[in-house]
Amino acid sequence: MAEAGLTIFDGSQLSDVDVSLPPPPIDTAITGAEVLELAETRASLPLLGFVLPETLKSSAIRRIGISDTAGFLSQKLDYTDACTNLRNYISAIADELKDDPIAVTILDGGSLNLFLEDEDDFAMLAENLFTDLDEEDRGKINKDEIQSALAHMGIESGVPSVSEYPQLNDILKKHGAAGKEELGQAQFAQLLQHVLQELADSLAKKPVVVGLRNIKLANGSKLRKLLAKERLPDNDGKKISEEKFECNGDQSQATKIKSYLKKHEDDFGLPPSQLPEMTAIFDEIFTEVDTENDAAESGRDSSVVFLKKILEKIAKKLEANPILYDIQLSQLE
């Protein structure tokens, strides 16, 4: 998939990962570090070479019961233990991705070529970038501002950062884009064209997978895990009974629970309630539930029963139709 779209890594890609371990030479121990490195390499292959985030790896390590990571890395394992840890770690990585899927985009030069192939589009792009960078309106900018131009374009335009694509540094150096020489708009456009063309060619040969930290996929996984903890609905039922709501007058049980879930959506792994998809889910579920019967009872027990019923319905809805959303945009809204 080109950078125009998204790919979601949800753990399903790891179902066929090779979890076998080649027999080591006789009397040769395998260290924990070697096992983890091999597992991460194997897991990365079906993820198109995506480098697993450190937070994900740390969570996966804890999931398989390793509390002292440093100690495990230097620990010498026999073949059986090494095989077990390899298999368990890859499985834990898949489970982490299932619980918290990662959205990525694959930069392969496609979007850059669209700019470069259309002279009018490229001329407009170069002009806009030059204008943004020429803050003093001198009609001149330093040559090294080409790096700022690329940062302005960003992954939305198919341009990775240097940290995501180290080869970009070599391209910039090749074209002398690190100097203080001043360029006019035409010179800037020419340099930008050369850099972008070489970057597009490089990405076509070796695409890069970039994680989108601001994109989240809510699939109900966290909510299902919370529901599995028997105390959660009971504890939250108590909080609902005790919490003071801003609305005036008596409130139905349904209204109280809806307000509570919107206020604590992050705790339940719910997407922002202002999203149209989530609004539709709330409207549908709270219409389905027989509020009169549940609200007929008062107190903590009825809150627990009603809350659990609603949470189970939300979890099923999100599992059937996960919601993909932009964290930054939802916060602005």
Image (spheres, helix red, strand yellow):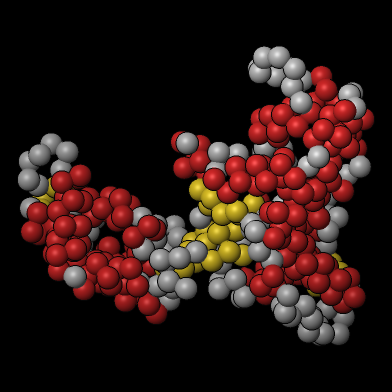
Residue 75, quarter of the rendered image: bottom right
Q: Residue at x 23, y 55 (%)?
A: 146
Q: Between residues 176 and 200, which one lies in front from this camera angle?
A: 200
Which of these two is toward me, 84 or 125?
125
Question: Hey, which residue is sitting farthest front in the picture?
Answer: 292
Work out whether 319 lies above or below 16: above
Work out whether 102 lies above or below 271: below
Q: Quadrant of residue 92?
A: bottom right
Q: Residue at x 83, y 59 (%)?
A: 64
On the rendered structure, is 153 left or right of 144?
right
Question: In this orientation, which residue lies closer to the viewer: 61 or 289?
Answer: 289
Horizontal relation, residue 229 to residue 321: left or right? right
Q: Nearer the viewer, residue 114 or 81?
A: 114
**Relative image position of residue 128 (x, y in whole percent):** 18, 51
Q: Residue furthest top?
A: 249
The reply to whether residue 44 is visible in this rendering is: yes
- Above or below for 307 versus 322: above
Question: Could you tell whether 165 is left or right of 228 in the image?
Answer: left
Where does the image place residue 269, in percent across and percent down from the top left? 69, 44
Q: Residue at x 86, y 34 (%)?
A: 294
Identify which residue is drawn at 83% across, 43% down: 309
Percent of width and height locating residue 97: 68, 60
Is 147 on the left-hand or right-hand side of 298? left
Image spot of residue 126 (x, y percent): 17, 57
Q: Is residue 222 visible?
A: no
- Numbered circles on residues, count: 0
